[in-house]
Amino acid sequence: MAITDSFLDRKQLHVAMFPWLAFGHIIPFLELSKFVAQKGHKVSFLSTTRNIQRLPTLPSHLSPLINLVKLTLPRVQELPQNAEATMDVRTDDIHYLKKAYDGLQPVVTRFLEEESPDWIIYDFAPYWLPSVAAGLGISRAFFSIVNAWFLAFMGPSPDDLINSSDHKTTAEDFLTPPKWVPFPTKLCYRKHEVNWMVGGFSVNASGVSDVYRSGMVLKGSDCMFIRHCYEFEPQWLTLLEMLHHLPVVPVGLMPPETPTNIGDGKDDTWVMAKKWLDGQQIGRVVYVALGSEVMVSESDLAELALGLELSGLPFFWALRKPVGSSVELPDGFLERTRHRGVVWTSWVPQLQILSQSVGGFLTHCGWGSIVEG
């Protein structure tokens, strides 16, 4: 990992971590924290109280070096009680979570003032943090948990992103490869994906757009860390450096370690699921998981369910229903498939499942799930 030559081989440092409120972000930040601690450095991991309580147990040899700093998330009326991560809210309400996240600015600023870490490593969302840290003389790094081409697609400079109101972006712009990519590529969005992408330029309940957040974070950083490696699509890493005039440091794919103590009696519900998986033919089970944030419409859910039924294959479906959702599986589906399929609606240890009887992984293709797969 190239990160070792940048700062980790020097004297003991104090590195603060501040991820966005999504476990697809929090867990990679935690993995990076472990790597930094393995080098003998002190880490302060900042997140909200409930999210920290939901983290996996730290390795005993690293826990003395990683301080889990619990922050109280400000109350926003539109959010459910105790909602502190994207998995706790509907997709349409995530912008209210960003509003609450921005409310952490005073307490994060106070932490930086009192603790004076050498580095602060943050996510795309805290657009206000780079300027705060710079004013305190703290080195700053943006850690991207998505792959390089996603960022490169957005354009050549943070200023273009920040001044998005002057950026004449149409839906058609996203349907062809960007003109600033100097090598052959077919990278572009499909028509049904464009609305989501264009939405990133819109100001939401938090008062800013996601594109503005990313632009300010990039503009205020000393370097970019990214969950990527030179062995995989290296040309996109080089392009990122050229586009943003920042050192881009790939930290590796950082797959989390497969837990060895799951199913030892501590979680009776998982013991039941593991027993079912253990009874299946190796390489035969289809594992279905669409991540913690993807919300499937009732019609898409029905098509997916009926497709699994028609396949005739055994399946394990980790189905996350949105908070307050009335979306239901097709009538009779559970009864018709009960002898060869499981629909699991609570937490599952994905790595553990992937390492067992699974022969196929039906996924939303989020970068974290691709890495784990």
Image (spheres, rainbow, N blue to C red):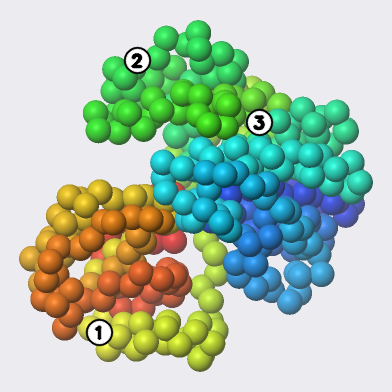
Q: Which of marks 3 and 2 is nearer the N terminus?
A: 3
What SS does tag 3 mark?
Answer: loop
Q: Which numbered disc covers residue 230?
A: none
Of 95 and 21, which appears nearest the observer?
95
Q: Which of 135 and 248 is in front in this view?
A: 135
* Image coords of residue 202 (percent x, y): 46, 23
For label 3, count other residues whose C-alpha is less than 10 Å away and answer few (under 14), some (14-19) or many (20+). many
Given contact means CB atoms under 8 Å apart, are the residues at marks 3 and 2 in contact?
no
> Marks 2 and 1, how far apart in space?
49 Å
Q: How many marks?
A: 3
Q: Position of residue 259 (x, y in %)?
A: 53, 76
Name the residue: 58% across, 49% down. 21
Residue 3 visible somewhere in the drawing: no
Residue at which label 1 appears: 280
Q: Which residue is labeled 2 in the image?
A: 170
Residue 296 higher or lower than 186, as above or below: below
Q: How far apart are the alpha carbons under marks 3 and 2?
A: 24 Å
1 vs 3, front mark: 3
Q: What is the secondary structure assignment of the residue under circle 2? A: loop
Q: What's the distance in space between the residues labelled 1 and 3, CA to CA?
A: 48 Å
Seen at 63% across and 62% down, the residue is 50
Q: Nearer the viewer, mark 2 or mark 1?
A: 2
Local SS, label 1: loop
Q: Which amino acid does label 1 sit on?
A: Gln
Question: Residue 322 vs residue 49: left or right?
Answer: left
Quarter in which the C terminus is drawn: bottom left
Q: Which amino acid does label 2 sit on?
A: Thr
Other-residue count near label 1 (Cα within 10 Å), few / some / many at <14 / 14–19 / ≥20:
some
Label number found at residue 127: 3
Residue 52 in view, yes or no: yes
